[in-house]
Amino acid sequence: MVNKDEFFREVTVRICSSLDVKTALKRAFDYMSLHLPLDTLSINIQDVSLKAIRRIATIVAGSEQLDQVIHLPKEVWQRMQDRQPIPTIIHNDQDEYFTLLAPYIRLKGNSLISVPLTLDAERIGTLVLGAHGEGRYLPCHLKLITRVANPFAIALVNALSYEKLLKYSDRLLDDNHFLSKELIGLTGPVIGAEGGLRHVAEMVRQVAPLNNTVLLLGETGTGKEVIANAIHAASPRKNGPFIKVNCGAIPENLLDSELFGHEKGAFTGAASDYRGRFERADGGTIFLDEIGELPPAAQVRLLRVLQNREIERVGGSRPIPIDIRVIAATHRNLERMVSKQDFREDLWFRLNVFPIIVPPLRQRKEDILPLTRFFIKRKSQELGMDRAPELAPGAIERLVNYSWRGNVRELENLVERELILHQGGKLRFELLPLERREELHQPPRRDGAPVVLRLDEAMARHLSDVLKIAKGKIYGPNGAAELLGVNPSTLRWRLDKLGIPHGRS
Ligand SMILES: Nc1ncnc2c1ncn2[C@@H]1O[C@H](COP(=O)(O)OP(=O)(O)OP(=O)(O)O)[C@@H](O)[C@H]1O
Ligand SMILES: [Mg+2]
């Protein structure tokens, strides 16, 4: 018989020889099998979620296969929970419990030793030795094995932590995957890319493959964020992160740590290291929305980041290089802010390398119909409607004539409201706020001050006036076409384009 101390030492050295529990178990198995009957060796846990015995690692001598998970009937599982385990040589007819368990643990024709593994009085699993043939284990074997239970317990704890880590890392990967899918969901199509936004779309195509800073300007709700997403999605960084910072929404005292991160202990409450948004955007794009709201101190720090392409965490002592593409956006007039010294001129120069102006909806009325259709489809799906309702005749004219101060966002909200309020049938859009619906049809000021009208607005007014004079008639003598000296079908086409309602005649 082997010397007990030597056995303990050799097994301990082997079971602690690798972080991979299977490798370590194999090394221990090879040694142990020289000194006692051994055909299978496994470390098991009771998996509460499965209500089963689960083998964390198993070594078998031949080509024999053992189940990874041993599912137990409810009553056997319960009996197992109620027992206080002790190191045991399991006999076939030892007691009623083992008779119940026997078919599940392959007791018949084999000998088994079971040793509970505990650490700090906590039961964590079981070490099971098996040998072919009955009655092969003696009390001296049990004693020998019981002495090495501790190193096996440590190996098991390590294996379990590792398993947990893998699970978390899988979950993180999954989260990441999910979030990028969410982001793809956000980057829907740019409606109007072939229409009223074609110049913008062209600039996006030019700038997307490059790395330069882009400044998106335009009124609220015009789609600046949609364009920022489109630039990222068409850029070589498209598989990297797209991190948005709403510069106006982060309280000033948190801004530095939110943008640049902080080191553990940098200030009260900094319990651990924190990666800021610039760091998170590494390899991708950072979208600095509402850049006009950035407080002066943060403007200085942003300028430094743009110049040096490196950041320093709050409380950090070394600069961290970052590889990012910057897209900034604002609905404010930055130039005016610079002249009023509300925005740093040097930062403005840095940002203003490639400005893209996203035009307001009133300057691209041709996009109203496709946008309305797009929102009807998307919103009716979101609202769980079976079918997207159609547009009633005249509805689009009403929309085109409306003055869209809130731009695309206002249109989107209006479509949603119309869908919620509509009682079946077609969408009429009759509930547009009245005062703005009529803005367009107010007579031009005649008090001598010149009124600057956009060309299509002036044309729309003139055509409406002429239609009134012609009593709505387009064709024939004294029809609007004749009065205007144009072809009736050209006139009809123009009226449609400007969204002016007209009859067929
Ligand atoms: N061309 C477009 N195609 C499809 N959807 C659009 C388009 N433009 C805007 N939208 C939608 O309109 C809404 C407002 O757009 P977005 O948030 O991009 O505007 P914004 O210019 O960033 O506004 P703000 O200045 O208020 O932040 C969003 O829901 C967006 O999906
Ligand atoms: Mg925005």
Image (cartoon, rainbow, N blue to C red):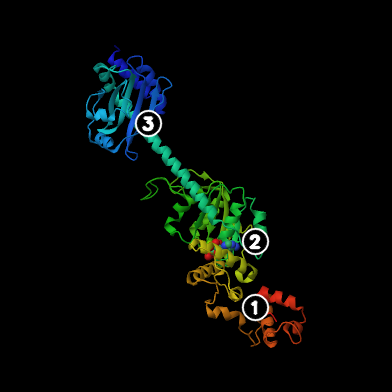
Which of labels 2 and 3 is toward the front?
A: 3
Q: Is residue 274 above or below residue 116?
A: below
Q: Residues within 10 Å of mark 1 (few under 14, many from 20)?
A: many
Q: Measuring from the top left, give residue 147's x and y in whole percent.
A: 27, 22
| Total numbered circles | 3
Determine whether, in the image, residue 126 is placed left or right of residue 303.
left
Q: Measuring from the top left, give residue 322's x and y in whole percent.
A: 54, 46
State the residue in front, 104 or 228.
104
SS for tag 1?
Answer: loop
Q: What residue is shown with label 3? A: 56
Residue 394 seen in the current view: yes
Residue sitting at 48 percent across and 47 percent down?
176
Name which quarter of the figure residue 71 lies in.
Answer: top left
Q: Amino acid under label 1? A: Ile
- Answer whether labels 2 and 3 touch (C-beta < 8 Å): no
Q: Amino acid under label 3? A: Ile
Residue sitting at 71 percent across and 74 percent down?
493
Q: CA distance from mark 2 to mark 1?
A: 24 Å
Q: What residue is shown with label 2? A: 193
Residue 454 seen in the current view: no
Q: Amino acid under label 2? A: Ala
The first of marks 3 and 1 along the sequence is 3
Q: CA distance from mark 3 to mark 1?
A: 75 Å
Name which quarter of the figure residue 357 lies in.
Answer: bottom right
State the residue in front, 351 or 35.
35
Q: Is residue 123 above or below residue 30?
A: below
